[in-house]
Image (spheres, rainbow, N blue to C red):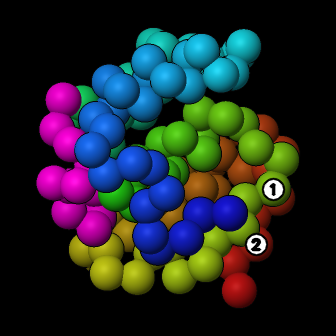
Amino acid sequence: IILDKNHFNASFTAIDINSIFSKVFKNWNKELFFSYIKEFDLPKDKKINDYSHGMKVKLNFGYAFFRKLKLLLLDETTNGLDPVFRNTLLSYISDFSKETGCAVFIP
């Protein structure tokens, strides 16, 4: 489930997330995770608390795409995003679904 709110600890950075989840998930791929961070233009050493709303949404999606989920539930996730990135994100979601077979549900 991807909500319009962030579920990561606000004091974490993307570097912290990588460090923690690389120990939790056996299939964690540091290069892939940071490729999403770079592609979404997110600062990897900035605290999530200092991210804008849109940046937090990008982080949530980068994490979800990385995990290669089977089902993606989106609840008002694109609210408050700038129109250009919203369209880009919807394109990413479509591509992700086609490439992985992930079902996407947008109520």
Which residue is at a point 48% across and 42% down the rendered structure image?
A: 62
Does residue 54 sit above or below 41 in this rendering? below
Which residue was labeled with disc 2?
105
Q: Amino acid at mark 2?
A: Phe
**How many circles with numbers are drawn on the protein?**
2
Whether residue 84 is visible, yes or no, is no
Residue sitting at 39 percent across and 48 percent down?
Answer: 9
Question: Mark 1 — residue?
Answer: 71
Please report contact status of discs 2 and 1: CB closer than 8 Å, yes or no.
yes
Quarter of the figure with residue 71: bottom right
Up the image or down, 95 lies above or below 14; here it is: below
The x and y percentages for residue 52 are 20, 63
Relative to 13, is 23 on the left or the right? right
Is residue 47 rendered to the left or right of residue 6?
left
In this rendering, position of residue 36 left or right of residue 106? left
User: In the image shown, does 87 or 4 lie closer to the viewer?
Assistant: 4
Residue type, label 1: Leu
Q: Can residue 32 be found in the magenta stretch?
A: no
Identify the residue at image location x=59%, y=63%: 2
Q: Quarter of the image for the C terminus: give it.
A: bottom right
When the figure is inspected, residue 102 is found, relative to residue 6, above or below; the finding is: above
Q: Which residues are magenta?
A: 45-55
Residue 16 drawn at (x, y percent): 36, 27
Q: Residues within 10 Å of mark 1 (few under 14, many from 20)?
A: some
User: Which is more toward the observer, 105 or 22?
Assistant: 22
Image quadrant in which you'd find residue 73: bottom right
Mark sitting on residue 56: none
Question: First in sequence: mark 2 or mark 1?
Answer: 1
In the orientation shown, which residue stands out farthest toward the bottom? Answer: 107
The reply to whether the magenta stretch includes residue 50 is yes
Q: CA distance from mark 2 to mark 1?
A: 8 Å
Residue 37: x percent and y percent?
A: 34, 34
